């Protein structure tokens, strides 16, 4: 990414944090670059990237700003569901240049079969990007079977509860949302299992667990690299040798992570599905990358000085974003 674009986006980070959401200018750039559509096919206005291509971009965005990277990652990940949706509905939804899905994987809703669809009620927390979501995704437990079913609702059908009060990733606006006795047509139901794939692109055959682990891990990577660079540039008690050692340790695990991810993608393309051993390597290296990234930030933090505790400083924001992200269940390695 050109340095001018990096500087422009990074320069908006403090304003976004104060707003508690991404700025209009940040969103304009995201829509223009189609970053929410990383995994959406080109014929639906997306970039149609491979998983390794998208993950490297997500790392770069998280290195610019944690809230920016996290929001793009979670929203692009939710837009990946296009590959599992009724395509007559998906085509209408994704023709919109600003379509953005987001929601929760927690099965905290309930649904009953009703008149060719479902009657749904529930409340879900931590929906990244609520101010600009066009559709909300949610999991519910079906009353008839006890199974979990995934739904998506248009934004007008939900009530947003502005309860995101974390000390970091403030601009992700990861608020809760709820619906009450909402009738949902069966065309707004989807399932992210191999048998339910509706599109041919191999990215939709990539297992969701490792998809999520890899995309979230590189957010921690990007934020940690940003923290190390910022700490190293401040001088004081953070010597060049200390910063270089931290970068080297993170870099070692980064190489292993990308080797595992590329291997899994090659197997997907050439053998239709990565082996269990290859997928386990992606999971292991995702966790190792997250652990290493956090550890190196922790090593440097005490040497930065009181500026690291100043909530108005850039390095403090990076720290808060990094350790807010660390509380995601898939990142608690």
Image (cartoon, rainbow, N blue to C red):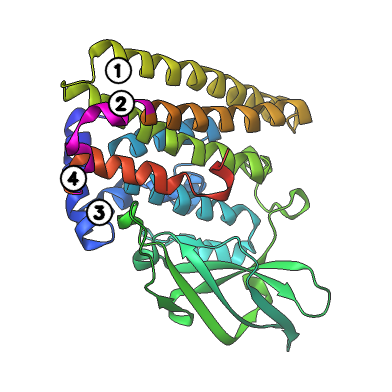
Image quadrant containing the C terminus:
top right
Identify the residue at horizontal 39%, vertical 51% (top origin): 71
Question: Which disc is residue 310 wearing?
Answer: 4
Residue count near mark 4 (Cα–Cα under 10 Å), binned few <14, some 14–19, many ≥20: few
Image quadrant containing the N terminus:
top left
Question: Which disc is residue 228 wearing?
Answer: 2
Tell me the element at label 2: helix
Residue 285 in sight in this render: yes
Q: Nearer the viewer, mark 2 or mark 3?
A: 2
Question: In terms of sequence position, does the residue under pointer 2 or pointer 1 come before the other?
Answer: 2
Q: Which residue is mark 1?
A: 243
Say whether marks 2 and 1 touch (CB < 8 Å).
Answer: yes
Identify the residue at horizontal 39%, vertical 60% (top origin): 129
Q: Nearer the viewer, mark 3 or mark 4?
A: 4
Residue 46 in sight in this render: no
Tell me the element at label 4: loop
Residue 55: x, y in percent?
Answer: 48, 34
Q: Nearer the viewer, mark 4 or mark 2?
A: 4
Q: Is residue 194 left or right of residue 127?
A: right
Say whether marks 3 and 4 touch (CB < 8 Å).
Answer: no
Question: In terms of sequence position, does the residue under pointer 4 or pointer 2 come before the other?
Answer: 2
Residue 124: image quadrant is: bottom right
Segment tinted magenta in the rendering: 299-311
Question: In terms of sequence position, does the residue under pointer 3 or pointer 4 come before the other?
Answer: 3
Type of secondary structure dominating the magenta stretch: helix
Tell me the element at label 3: helix
Say whether marks 1 and 4 touch (CB < 8 Å).
Answer: no
Question: Which disc is residue 28 wearing?
Answer: 3
The foreground one among 174 and 309 is 309
Residue count near mark 1 (Cα–Cα under 10 Å), binned few <14, some 14–19, many ≥20: many
Residue 57: x, y in percent?
Answer: 40, 34
């Amino acid at each position: 990414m050109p340095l001018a674009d990096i500087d422009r986006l990074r320069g908006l980070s403090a304003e976004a944090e104060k707003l508690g959401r991404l700025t209009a200018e940040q969103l304009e750039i995201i829509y223009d670059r189609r970053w929410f559509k990383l995994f959406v096919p080109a014929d639906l206005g997306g970039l149609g990237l491979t998983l390794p291509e998208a993950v490297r971009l997500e790392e770069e965005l998280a290195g610019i700003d944690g809230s920016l990277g996290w929001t793009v990652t979670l929203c692009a990940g939710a837009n990946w569901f296009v590959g599992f949706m009724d395509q007559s509905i998906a085509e209408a939804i994704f023709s919109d240049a600003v379509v953005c899905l987001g929601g929760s994987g927690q099965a905290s809703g309930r649904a009953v079969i009703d008149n060719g669809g479902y009657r749904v009620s529930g409340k879900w927390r931590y929906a990244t990007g609520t101010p600009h979501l066009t559709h909300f995704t949610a999991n519910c437990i079906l009353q008839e079977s006890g199974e979990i079913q995934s739904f998506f609702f248009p934004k007008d059908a939900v009530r947003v509860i502005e309860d995101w009060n974390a000390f970091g990733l403030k601009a992700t606006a990861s608020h809760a949302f709820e619906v009450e006795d909402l009738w949902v047509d069966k065309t707004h139901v989807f399932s992210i299992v191999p048998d339910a794939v509706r599109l041919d692109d191999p990215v939709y055959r990539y297992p969701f667990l490792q998809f999520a682990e890899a995309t979230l891990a590189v957010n921690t990577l990007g934020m940690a690299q940003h923290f190390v660079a910022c700490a190293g540039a401040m001088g004081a008690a953070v010597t060049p040798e200390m910063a270089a050692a931290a970068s080297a340790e993170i870099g070692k695990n980064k190489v292993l992570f990308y080797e595992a991810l590329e291997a899994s993608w090659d197997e997907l393309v050439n053998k239709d599905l990565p082996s269990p051993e290859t997928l386990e390597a992606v999971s292991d290296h995702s966790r190792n990358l997250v652990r290493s990234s956090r550890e190196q930030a922790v090593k440097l933090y005490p040497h930065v000085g009181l500026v690291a505790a100043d909530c108005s400083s850039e390095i403090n924001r990076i720290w808060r974003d990094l350790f807010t992200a660390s509380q995601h269940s898939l990142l608690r390695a």
